[in-house]
Image: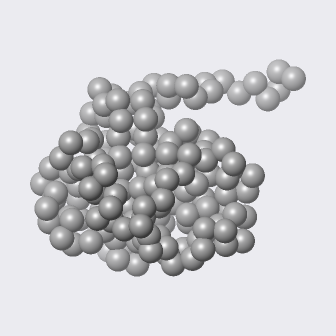
């Protein structure tokens, strides 16, 4: 199973660093869609990702249009994470999917409205939360959905039991 985490125009370097770490530790591929609000070699991005950057499968895209032309939403198992989503992220059966893409928008605005409107009824997913607050932190949202996809694949290729104390 191949999981692709796609950050569209991320704004906060620490979030991107934390997400990069999550991707590296789970084997997910990280796609960064430009423009970024920071340089990828920014110290705070690297610090949040610590020593995981060399283990990260990273692909950068110059624009959202470039990404969507390369990985066509209608031809791929592609989902758009948004508080406006019609389907809970847990209601999707990822277990039969060989490859999954999950797109996340920038921290201040989310994904573009035109994209959400186009796929609102069939490809948008949401994490349930109280309606009185805006949303979870982006890196937390990525971790929650990432681990649900991996859970449905029985955490394939991931370590099941810690061997730390067996040394």
Where residue 138 sits in the image (x, y, percent)? 47, 64
Q: Residue at x 66, y 24 (%)?
A: 161
Give the tally of numbered discs: 0
**Picture quadrant where residue 91 is located:** top left
Residue 23 is left or right of residue 65, and the answer is right
**Picture quadrant where residue 66 is located:** bottom left
Residue 136 seen in the figure: no
Q: Quadrant of the C terminus?
A: top right
Residue 99 is left or right of residue 43, and the answer is left
Q: Residue at x 71, y 27 (%)?
A: 162
Image vertical order of residue 77 relative to residue 130, above or below: above
**Picture quadrant where residue 67 is located:** bottom left
Find the residue positioned furthest to the top: 166
Where residue 58 sits in the image (x, y, percent)? 54, 51
Q: Quadrant of the N terminus?
A: top left
Image vertical order of residue 63 relative to residue 140, above or below: below
Q: Residue at x 35, y 46 (%)?
A: 101
Observer-nearest of 149 and 61: 61
Where residue 95 sits in the image (x, y, percent)? 33, 28
Residue 112 is left or right of residue 164, and the answer is left
Where residue 45 sits in the image (x, y, percent)? 65, 67
Residue 48 seen in the figure: yes
Observer-nearest of 104 and 132: 104
């Amino acid at each position: 199973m191949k999981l692709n985490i796609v950050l569209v125009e991320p704004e906060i370097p620490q979030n991107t660093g934390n997400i990069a770490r999550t991707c590296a530790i789970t084997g997910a591929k990280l796609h960064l869609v430009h423009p970024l609000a920071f340089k990828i070699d920014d110290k705070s991005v690297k610090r949040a990702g610590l020593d995981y950057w060399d283990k990260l499968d990273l692909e950068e895209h110059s624009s959202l249009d470039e990404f969507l032309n390369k990985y066509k939403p209608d031809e791929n198992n592609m989902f758009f994470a948004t508080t406006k989503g019609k389907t809970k992220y847990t209601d999707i059966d990822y277990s039969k999917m060989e490859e999954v893409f999950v797109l996340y928008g920038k921290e201040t605005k989310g994904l573009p409205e035109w994209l959400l409107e186009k796929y609102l009824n069939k490809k948008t997913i949401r994490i349930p939360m109280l309606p009185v607050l805006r949303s979870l932190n982006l890196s937390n949202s990525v971790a929650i959905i990432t681990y649900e996809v991996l859970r449905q694949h029985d955490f394939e290729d991931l370590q099941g039991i810690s061997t730390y104390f067996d040394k």
